[in-house]
Image: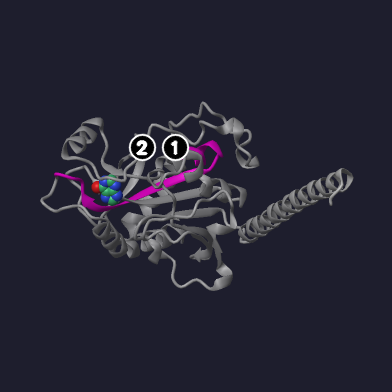
Amino acid sequence: MVTGEEDRADRAFESQLARLAGSRARTQRTVRDVSTLLDMTKAIEQLRDHHADTAIILGSGLNSLVADPKSDQIIPYAEFSEIPKPSVPGHLGRFVLGEIEKTKIIFAQGRVHLYEGHSARAVTSIVRVLAEAGIKQLIVTNAAGALNPKFKPGEWMMITDHINLTGTSPLLLWRQASSPAISDAPNFLDMTDAYSLRLREKFHTAAKKIDIVLHEGVYAGSIGPQYETPAEVRMLQKLGADAVGMSTVLEVIQARALGLEVAGFSCLTNLAAGLSKDKLSHEEVLETGKNSAAEFGRLLESTLK
Ligand code: HPA
């Protein structure tokens, strides 16, 4: 027979075991957190050690600008707990340490979008990591639908300004930001010269030199993921937009808040809805992007020479 005293001792022993198990689980979590932090620090150091002033975010279909990187040039986004995993075909999800005309570049192959269910903070995490890696200039590229009737699919547009139609901003939650890179970002940010005139002039001169068509215009950034209706396309044209896409505007807001100089380029992968008889598809966007990537590569080479 179990006495009352033995019963009490058993219960005390069991509760001590439960406390020990809890403390073991907490220790394991801390070890995991610390090792994630160490991996992240190592990955940032790797990016920093490349000593690049410029980074290029590559949009849909534009990955071919980076030819077969070696494994020691690749840093997966997964090394950074802040960056969500891209889920869209054509978005690889990695940084590549590269070079164009002896200029060191960090390529960001793939991005994350609002329409994947992420917040404005999350979709701009790539920009914050790049700023922490020490870059000074950010070149953003995207695939976009042409709204301007003078533009043709396959051509490029240099972005002069944007219209943020996403209804959100990466600066909304800046007081809660844990990243030191944005701790003193101004929240009433002046966006007058978001797209650097200095860089635009450089790219324009280079485009003329190698005789490629480089339009200029206003990019409208929507949430997506559905393409626009023809009525929305007519509205966007009236608003003064020349191209429409589902990215870029939040990244540029974040980049400017961090003091980065920005240039932006849209690969016009299709005429926007209702402007041609063709149906829109992501496959067509990727295909046209792939075909136009080489031309953008030549523009970069000519600009950085
Ligand atoms: N609309 C929005 N996003 C796009 C388009 C478009 O027509 N083409 C490529 N991305």
Labelled pair 1, 2 in contact (Cβ < 8 Å): yes
The residue nearer to you, when weighing 30 against 47, is 30
Q: Residue at x 61, y 52 (%)?
A: 133
Relative depth, front residue between 147 and 175? 175
Question: Which mark identifies residue 194?
Answer: 1
Ligand 1 within 8 Å of the CB at mark 2: no
Task: Report which residue position mark 2 lands on.
Answer: 162
User: Label 1: how many residues lie within 10 Å, few (<14), some (14-19) or many (20+)?
Assistant: many
Q: 127 and 304: which one is in front?
A: 127
Image location of residue 37, percent across then percent down: 68, 53
Q: Residue 196 appears in which quarter of the rendering?
A: top left
Between circles 1 and 2, the one closer to the viewer is 2
For the record, the magenta segment spans 252-274
Q: Amino acid at mark 2?
A: His
The answer to whether residue 105 is seen in the rendering is yes
In the visual, does 243 lie left or right of 37? left
Dot 2 lies on which element?
strand
Placement of 257 over or under 152, stated as above or below: above
Residue 268: x and y in percent read 27, 52
Where does the image place residue 222, in percent across and percent down from the top left? 33, 39
Which residue is drawn at the image coordinates 31% and 46% (left, top)? 225
Q: CA distance from mark 1 to mark 2?
A: 9 Å
Asked whether, in this view, residue 88 is left or right of residue 8, the answer is left
Taking the magenta stretch, the answer to whether it contains residue 137 is no
Name the residue furthest front. Answer: 1
Front residue of 37 and 46: 37
